[in-house]
Image (spheres, rainbow, N blue to C red):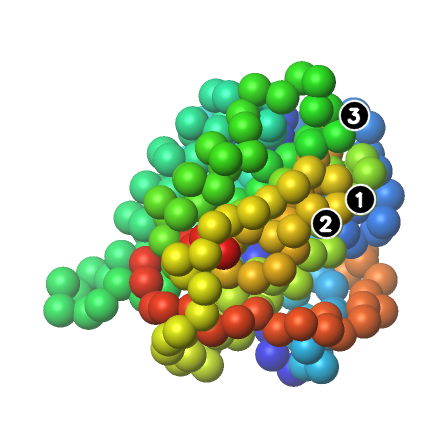
């Protein structure tokens, strides 16, 4: 069975662990316990294809940045999380993305930089009254990150777009691994994301959400997830023009 390493990245307190635990265990953890490193495994089916996901939830604190960089080097795809209620966590995404590019740049200058499958998730969309990052700002940052990036707003608390971000990330990885060129598509179409139950923003058709404020404990949880009984997604991602990292719809 195909296995992909998914690395969850973002500043502390953005709800990375809450999103991950909601996806793995379908439970919302309502307390903040800074993560150092947690790992999970989950078997899913996306577009009729079974995949084993090895999900690594990383620390958001700067003191663990070296450890996070090592995980970035190993990842096949990345879920970058910020909180819509914390503008600094949104700005930190630029710094984290630069570190990701640095870790993924080939040592041989003659080698081409590979596409980076990336989901940018504006989390805690259930806290709309506390919003400090607009949906448009999220879309613009995703566009800056390149074609192989999609934008969602998510909520672990209300389980909005939780499954969708992981499924779309698997599609992006599949696209890169299969060497899809991504020609055509709607790269120039307006990125139209709404909050609860809206439509996706970057490459395809679904996005939105938000989340309660949480990150989980430390240590490893490999094998703690029950195999997911996911329905195959009904609409595979449309091919897009090949580019750097993320895209707008």
Residue nearest the observer in this picture, 101 or 108: 101
**Going by the image, does 49 lie left or right of 203?**
right
Query: Which one is earlier in the sequence, the residue at label 1 or at label 3?
Result: 3
Image location (x, y in percent) of residue 209: 70, 40
Q: Is the C-beta separation of discs 3 and 2 under 8 Å?
A: no
Q: Residue at x 59, y 37 (%)?
A: 122
Residues at marks 1 and 3, CA–CA distance in whole angstroms: 16 Å
Q: Residue furthest top?
A: 130
Where is residue 57? Give x, y as percent: 61, 45
Residue that numbered label 2 is attached to: 162
Give the labeled residue for mark 1.
159
Give the class, few, some or many, for how many residues have Cα within 10 Å of label 3's Cα (few <14, many ≥20): some
Locate the N terminus and report the quarter of the image it occupies.
Answer: bottom right
In the rendered view, would you say 161 is above or below 210? below
Secondary structure under tag 2 reads: helix
Give the number of the disc on residue 31. 3
Residue at position x 85%, y 49% in the image = 26
Is 221 in front, or is 60? 60
Give the mark nearest the N terminus, 3 or 2. Answer: 3
Q: Position of residue 237 (x, y in %)?
A: 57, 70
Badge 2 crowding class, 10 Å Cα cut-off, few under 14, some 14 to 19, many 20 or more, is: many
Q: Is residue 117 visible?
A: no
């Amino acid at each position: 069975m195909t296995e992909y390493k998914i690395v969850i990245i973002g500043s502390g307190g953005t709800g990375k662990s809450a999103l991950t635990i909601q996806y793995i265990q379908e439970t919302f953890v309502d307390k903040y316990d800074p993560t150092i490193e947690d790992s999970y495994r989950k078997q899913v089916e996306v577009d009729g294809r079974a995949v084993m996901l090895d999900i690594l939830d990383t620390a958001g604190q700067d003191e663990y940045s070296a450890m996070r960089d090592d995980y970035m080097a190993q990842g096949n795809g990345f879920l970058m999380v910020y909180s819509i209620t914390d503008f600094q966590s949104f700005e930190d995404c630029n710094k984290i993305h630069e570190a990701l590019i640095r870790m993924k740049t080939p040592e041989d200058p003659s080698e081409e930089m590979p596409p980076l499958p990336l989901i940018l998730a504006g989390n805690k969309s259930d806290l709309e009254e506390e919003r400090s990052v607009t949906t448009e700002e999220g879309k613009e940052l995703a566009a800056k990150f390149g074609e192989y990036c999609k934008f969602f707003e998510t909520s672990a608390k209300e389980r909005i777009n939780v499954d969708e971000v992981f499924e779309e990330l698997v599609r992006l990885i599949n696209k890169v691994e299969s060497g899809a060129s991504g020609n055509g598509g709607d790269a120039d179409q307006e990125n139209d994301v709404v909050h609860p139950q809206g439509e996706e923003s970057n490459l395809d058709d679904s996005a939105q959400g938000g989340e309660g404020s949480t990150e989980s404990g430390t240590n490893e949880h490999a094998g703690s997830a029950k195999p997911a009984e996911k329905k195959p997604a009904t609409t595979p991602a449309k091919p897009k023009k090949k580019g750097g990292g993320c895209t707008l719809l």
